[in-house]
Amino acid sequence: MKSFKLNNGIDIPAIGFGTWQIPEGEEAYQAVTEALKVGYTHIDTAAIYGNEKSVGRAIKDSGIARDTLFITTKLWNTERGYDKTIAAFEKSLTDLGLAYIDLYLIHWPANESQFENWATINAETWKALEYLYQQGKVKAIGVSNFPKDYLAKLLETVTIVPAVNQIEFHPGYLQQETVDLCKSNGILVQAWSPLGSGRILQDETLIALAEQKDTSVGQICIKFALSQGILPLPKSTNPLNIKRNLTVDNFDLTEEDIQTISELPTMGFSGSDPKKVAF
Ligand SMILES: NC(=O)c1ccc[n+]([C@@H]2O[C@H](COP(=O)([O-])OP(=O)(O)OC[C@H]3O[C@@H](n4cnc5c(N)ncnc54)[C@H](OP(=O)(O)O)[C@@H]3O)[C@@H](O)[C@H]2O)c1
């Protein structure tokens, strides 16, 4: 598995396995077990997904050496603030059954539609992540769903620059300004819903490209994220798709293909604007 290097020197496997909406229990256990079996070494979960216990059990039962895996989880919105963040982190660690986390993210920023002091809340929460990092309980810390100006605001207060910003990114929804700010600050962008959560798989341009390359639209989307220096986190519970999504070295996207995908009209947006969401 290829990797990206985070701004603190840590290597992160270049494709991660997404686990949102995979129910706790047998389904999450089987999906993660399958992913680990076919070669994923990077798993993305979150406290709010409710499946950390099954993800952790699959990791343990795989017998794969812990230090060859990269595990991300996220702080849920109800747990913001210094003390609550530290307690929430400990709970995730326990639920996953791990001694440390590779990457811990603030799942969503406190936003201006819910909080007058949103910037202060985000800065305090970040301080807790810095503390956890300094304690060695997490190998890297980052944020998720921070739009350009929220990230810029946070950067004014940090001691440690976030290693990652995990944002919605797929053909038809590129968030270029946020991506540019991340890149200019050495922050790796991770693509959530790299396949638009399935909403863009019927796009005719993408289908034509996939046919031309003898691959699938999902793989085109994953390769496109990688071509932009962005780390995709595809999710699947289907063994065929789980495997396919890791197989992107058997075709190329030309500069022209990348241009074509970049210029697709807006499509597949989740509808979750971080500045407006009510959760
Ligand atoms: N930080 C955040 O706020 C946030 C938000 C959303 C998501 N995420 C992360 O990003 C991950 C991915 O996002 P996502 O789960 O929304 O969706 P996604 O990976 O963009 O798409 C998943 C959907 O596409 C289908 N699929 C997967 N591979 C396919 C392929 N090769 N061909 C055809 N269909 C395929 C899946 O169905 P099958 O299961 O049937 O294959 C599923 O319906 C999440 O699981 C989560 O880890 C983070």
Image (tube, helix red, strand yellow):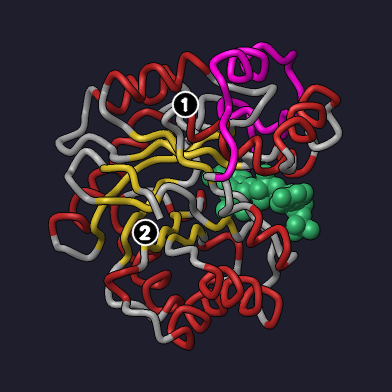
Is residue 213 depicted above or below 77 in this figure?
A: above
Quarter the N terminus occupies: bottom left
Please state which amino acid type lies under the numbered disc 2.
Answer: Lys
Residue 173 percent coordinates (x, y):
65, 23
Residue at x 45%, y 30% (from the top left corner):
146
Foreground: disc 1 or disc 2: 1
Is residue 216 depicted above or below 78 in this figure?
A: above
The 10 Å Cα crowd at callout 2, few under 14, some 14 to 19, many 20 or more, is some
> Seen in the image, is 114 located left or right of residue 156?
right
Residue at x 22%, y 65% (from the top left corner):
137
Residue 21 percent coordinates (x, y):
70, 59
Q: Tell me where the magenta segment starts and ends, as one range.
A: 250-279
Q: Distance between the residues labelled 1 and 2?
A: 36 Å
Q: Name the residue under label 2.
A: 84
Residue at x 22%, y 58% (from the top left corner):
132
Please state which amino acid type lies under the numbered disc 1.
Answer: Gln
Is residue 87 depicted above or below 206 in this figure?
A: below
